[in-house]
Image (cartoon, coloured by chain):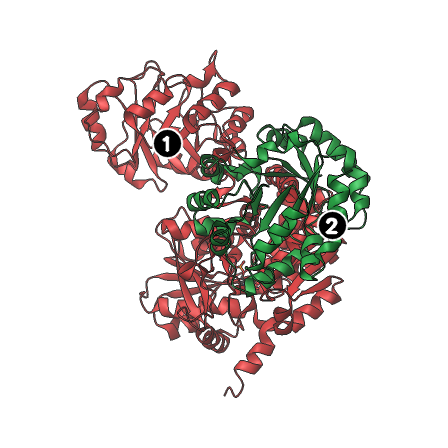
Chain colours: A green, B red
Amino acid sequence: MNRLEQLKSSGNKAFVAYVMAGDGGLERLREQVQYLQGAGVTAIEIGIPFSDPVADGPTIEAAGNRALKQGVTLQKVLEELKSWTFDIKIPLLVMTYLNPVLKFGVERFATECGKAGISGVIIPDLPYEHKQLVQPQLDKENIKLIQLVTLTTTDIRLDAILREAEGFVYAVTIKGITGSRDELSQDVKMFMQKIRKKSPVPVYAGFGISKSSHVDMLRDDVDGFIVGSAIVEAFNAGKIEEIEPLIRAVTTA
Amino acid sequence: MTKVKICGLKEKQHVQAASRADAVGFVFAPSKRQVTIEQAAELAKHVPVDADKIGVFVNASLKEIEDTVAGVPLTMVQLHGDEPDELVKAIQVPVIQAFSIRTKEDVAKLKRSLADYVLVDAPGTDYRGGSGNVFDWSLLDGADIDPDRLIVAGGLNPGNVHAAIEQTTPYMVDVSSGVETDNRKDTVKIQEFIKQVKGDSVEQTLEKVGFFGKYGGQFVPETLMKAVKELEDAYNEAKEDPEFHKEYHHYLSEYVGREQPLTFAKRMTEAYGGPKIYLKREDLNHTGAHKVNNAIGQALLAMRMGKRKIVAETGAGQHGVATATICALFDLDCVIFMGEEDIKRQQLNVFRMKLLGARVESVTKGSATLKDAVNEALRYWVANVEDTHYLIGSALGPHPFPTMVRDFQSVIGEETKRQILEKEGRLPDTILACVGGGSNAIGMFYPFIQDKEVELIGVEAAGQGVDTDKHAATLTKGTDGVLHGALMKLLQDDAGQVQEAHSISAGLDYPGIGPEHAHLADTGRVEYRSITDDEALAAVISMSRLEGIIPALESAHAIAEAQKQAKQMTADQILVICVSGRGDKDMATYAEKLEGLS
Ligand SMILES: Cc1ncc(COP(=O)(O)O)c(C=O)c1O
């Protein structure tokens, strides 16, 4: 069974952590994943670096460039994941732009993700309209294609997206690109409530979540939180333990 | 996939219901579905640009047919009478010849047709031109008709079309009475018929509207989907509004100074020793290049959408200057992203943009050139999407940008076509244009795409040579990939990371190519060649001294290729070069590279 299917039943709020694969060297990925699993996160998104990451903010883009300098590729990341023998109990997801997947081959990407034990895939530049490009191949491997919705998603599209949503829904909390922002707008709260009412799968808020005040504001309206830039920054600065209070704030309250 | 034609349309709502069809038919012969040229011309405005508009005639004269083709305009002609072979041959656009099928002998007659396509129909009753009766499809079994030429009609309806396709595997199916209720077209039946042929997934719809073959699409973050769709709707609506066209053409003539001459290049013609050479003078536009044609169109559209903030990227700075100029004219807020590398190469244009009141943001990421400027402009758009229009500068990006930019630049080719017919009484043999993202080239080529006798050549930048790693020859060296919202051809490594392009000319220094060009390369309709930095510089000197026109470095690529091409052509042939811009902005590069010139 796909581990993402157990998410909703768990009761607690979810904490999904994002790491940039190969930032600081690909060999660090296993310790990062083990660390996060130990710290109690619900799932981990493994980011694949890309030369033109238009949906990412400066923190993740810089991490991607560091990884690219180390020669990290989609293939190397998947090889690395397949080599792991330690026990992974939480769902792992791959987050990548579309072009590396097309170059690698969609079919091959799906089977290799299957072999690497990946539960879900997020492709930020693959909108609902084009998802048939990869959905059938992922279906065959029972890997979920996670959909994003944003404040600018129209109601018609929102309904269509949610009707076919699987795994969880990635609800984008700010209009802009990834990166930590100080203020979360009030529209966000209503937006989350609307999605949650319609969604057949858990709704996680992401993009711009970096402090417990964000979590407090949205706690009642979502099923969990996705945290990217704050974790990437903490790993890069060698201060990952500073993220633990945020994880606890989400998962234990 | 089998194509669909909906025939005998008389009302706008039915034309619109047929928007997913590949072709629509207007009947000019006596029939209850007959329309006049004026009516058809009005209806044709609602037909998608990539769909065929087919006129149905019964024993009309060549003159009647030609007048109708020009008046609507039509892209194909369908003949339902006893037209002689001479008439079939004399018609300039592709021809469909229809045959009523009763017996195997009728099938044999059809096989001898000289038309591009043959249409099989059941025998007519009171009117010629289709009766609605079902013909016996099995008559085609073993008839050995090329399925790529075959169009099946006669009593098709949403209920039986599937079976007809299975049995005859035609190029296209044609329906008229099968999508009518009480002798009038029925919107629901039209849509149902198309759905039966094409399936109904969003994918397939998009395949028609946002794609050129397999290239194109809307590969953008979810945050931008609303803006992209709104733009698509707004453009579709504006495109059909005569007022919008009037305004656009008003600014083109009163502000940009169009139409631009098609100059006969006498001394170049003599020096190159081949065909007669004509120059399309986009260098004479206000702001110095073709970019302004597109900037005006998009700025008018943005204002129509209630947006008064503009973001744009620029490479050579020509598009940035054009955008800043138009923003000054219309009092719009303007931010331009430009690579740090390009800022160095194009100092003069940076100053111009600032003088015009634009904010120029330097981009230091990646290769610090055009690709990275597009990334930053897209990011800025993501963050400011509610009140900002992204005024993209080439035939790139998510749908509808490539189509829209092409349409706004098509004025280049439309004028050229009119001018060459006036001057020479015929179309040119060869047309050359440089390709960066591809906007001047597609604008020049598009009106000639259906004129198969005109050879179209796009010229990319080979930088220091296509076999070095310093070039921008995307079509020569690139592979399929997604960048900046569209599937196109890209320079990329084995892991799908986009590579840096290199060209002495900032405007060609881009690792991708617009999706329509990628498609035209695949189909072979346009040939793409490449010219090195050194060859382009030599062409700058050559053209400056022969014609007193100092071209932009980008345009010099087309000129250099023209010089080679001319050697393979003869004195009775005609060659047209698109001079996309003037060289003022490149003077610092020229001064440096051509130092010691004597
Ligand atoms: C004069 C000129 N020609 C050509 C180009 C290339 O662009 P495109 O291929 O979109 O026409 C540029 C781009 O900056 C330009 O300034």
Chain under numbered label 2? A
Tell me which residue sits at (61%, 73%) in the image.
B345
Instruction: Give the left or right position of residue B462, taking residue A61 as reference.
Output: left
> SS class of the residue under badge 2?
helix
Instruction: Give the left or right position of residue B499, taking residue B152 as reference.
Output: right
From the image, state whether disc 2 or disc 1 is nearer to you: 2
Instruction: Please provide percent x and percent y for residue B290.
Output: 57, 59
Please give the label number shown on residue A244.
Answer: 2
Chain under numbered label 1? B
Task: Please tell me whether residue A207 is drawn above or below residue B64 in the rendered image.
Answer: below
> SS class of the residue under badge 1?
loop
Q: Give amino acid for label 2.
A: Glu
Task: Please tell me whether residue B417 is drawn above or below residue B82 in the rendered image.
Answer: below
Instruction: Please provide percent x and percent y for residue B15.
Output: 51, 28
Distance from mark 1 CB to nearest ligand 1 atom below 8 Å: no
Instruction: Please provide percent x and percent y for residue B60.
Output: 35, 30
The answer to whether residue B8 of the structure is visible from this angle is no
Instruction: Give the left or right position of residue B189, taking residue B118 as reference.
Output: right
Which of B122/B125 is in front? B122
Q: Quadrant of ligand 1?
A: bottom right
Quadrant assignment for the N terminus of chain B? top left
Tell me which residue sits at (44%, 56%) in the image.
B420
Q: Give amino acid for label 1.
A: Thr
Which of B383/B181 is in front? B383
- Identity of the residue furthest to the front in this view: A86
Please give the label number shown on residue B2.
Answer: 1
Tell me which residue sits at (52%, 70%) in the image.
B553
Pointers 2 and 1 in contact (C-beta within 8 Å)? no
